[in-house]
Image: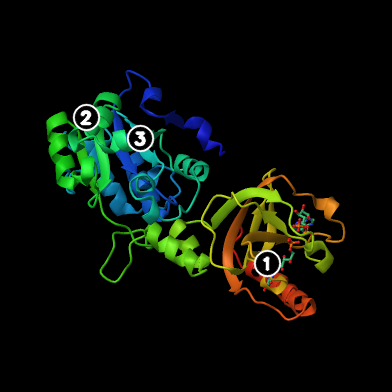
Amino acid sequence: MSDRLSDVQFWNGLEEVPRGLGPTAVTIGNFDGVHLGHQQVLARLVAAAHGQAAADTGAETGAGAETGEQADDAAAAAPGEVPSRTQSPTQAHTQPRAQAVAITFDPHPLQVHRPEESPVMLTGTAEKVQRLTETGIDALLVLHYNLDLAGLTAEEFVKTYFVDTLHASVVVIGHDVRFGRGNSGNFETMVELGRRYGFTVLGVDDFALSGRSVAETERRCSSTWVREALEAGDVAAAAEVLGRPHAVLGEVVHGAARGRGLGFPTANLGGDSEGMIPADGVYAGWLVDAAGARWPAAISVGSNPTFHGVERVVESHVIDRPTEEVEDFDLYGQHVRVEFVQRLRGMVAYEGVPKLVEQMYQDVEQTREVLSRLPAE
Ligand SMILES: Cc1cc2nc3c(=O)[nH]c(=O)nc-3n(C[C@H](O)[C@H](O)[C@H](O)COP(=O)(O)O)c2cc1C
Ligand SMILES: Nc1ncnc2c1ncn2[C@@H]1O[C@H](COP(=O)(O)OP(=O)(O)O)[C@@H](O)[C@H]1O
């Protein structure tokens, strides 16, 4: 877990929210992937809560001036009003500081309502929690999503969670928000409930990769976009929308012990790994070991068709390590993170091992090149 996590309060269910909480700014979402669009919303939440321009929050989203304006407005607007965009930003600084609280669901509502239609989650819950806590929020409330929760009317939901428990003074949401039984609540419902219960609603526009509101020619940052990119193996596009390389996390398990014989030992992830697995193919990326060391890696995703394998495996060959002795670099049993930077090629069923090995040398060379072109961290 990140250093930030220690500063962020983590509430697993309503029961864990401390009684007598001061005012809060609240946002709600599934936040699958915690992509740049999510990060912008969370930056606005933090800015609204702390009464300052988003650009000053220290959040890592690079939020622009427009974000700051809207967020200032939210902090300055009277309860129950949708804030205008013309108020003086200085007004915001006179407002008391509220706590920035993000609410998210676990599991994803679709997994409860229509599991057969539910998409593969981009990240596991632990990764989502970690990413959310890195955005500058003060607290994260994870709600266990079940049919009881789904059965609350829009008003019951808002009153129970936002008003009675979190004492929300500001609610930050997208214009396409849906909440309450049968998705009956929408943005206007929230504004109306804000009037009734005394909180300001700050509507945030969809964001594009530019970090600005979506223009006609642009696509909004979305979990669907990341999912499509990964399905196509375009991990570079996924990384752009996520604002970081996409990762699959898991335990290193034993494979066929063939890799060492080829001169390319590979750390194989077990079948219960977390994070969406990109399309079959070969990728340049990183393996982060249990101690947090980042190793450059040539990554293979597929069923080893050259050897007529059937099981789909994510396996990473750490480059620039002496490969003769597997024991010199023992990753078995470690929980590692495999990060995908760029696709190199598709998976090929080679006729004969020498051809595969020749290609693997080229993959490693290309991986080295790709990673060396990345800006230094
Ligand atoms: C960079 C790289 C590229 C690979 N490309 C292919 C490929 O094109 N076709 C294939 O069948 N296997 C490919 N593999 C997977 C190897 O077949 C696999 O790593 C090897 O059989 C060892 O399996 P093991 O870890 O179970 O011992 C690739 C592996 C790496 C590291
Ligand atoms: N450069 C390396 N990259 C990846 N794993 C390595 C490397 N060097 C040694 N290892 C170790 O070797 C193991 C993989 O060896 P391999 O022969 O491919 O066996 P398996 O089929 O069990 O994956 C890894 O799990 C790790 O413990």
The local secondary structure at tag 1 comes to loop
Q: Amino acid at mark 3?
A: Ala
Residue 306 sits above or below residue 46 on the image: below
Task: Using a 10 Å C-alpha cutoff, classify the residue at mark 3 as few (fewer than 14 neighbours), some (14 to 19) or many (20 or more).
Answer: many
* Quarter of the displayed picture in which ligand 1 can be seen: bottom right
Q: Residue at x 46, y 48 (%)?
A: 60
Disc 1 C-beta below 8 A from ligand 1: yes
> Which residue is label 3 attached to?
100
Choose the circle earlier in sequence order: 1 or 2. Answer: 2
* Circle 2 residue: 159
Is residue 120 left or right of 63 when viewed as pictured? right
Residue 89 seen by the camera: no
- In the rendered image, the quadrant that contains the C terminus is bottom right
Task: Specify the farthest residue to the top.
Answer: 20
* Distance in Å between CA atoms under marks 1 and 2: 54 Å
Crowdedness near tag 2: few (<14), some (14–19) or many (≥20) residues, C-alpha within 10 Å: some
Q: CA distance from mark 2 to mark 3?
A: 18 Å
Residue type at mark 1?
A: Gly
Q: Which residue is mark 1?
A: 309
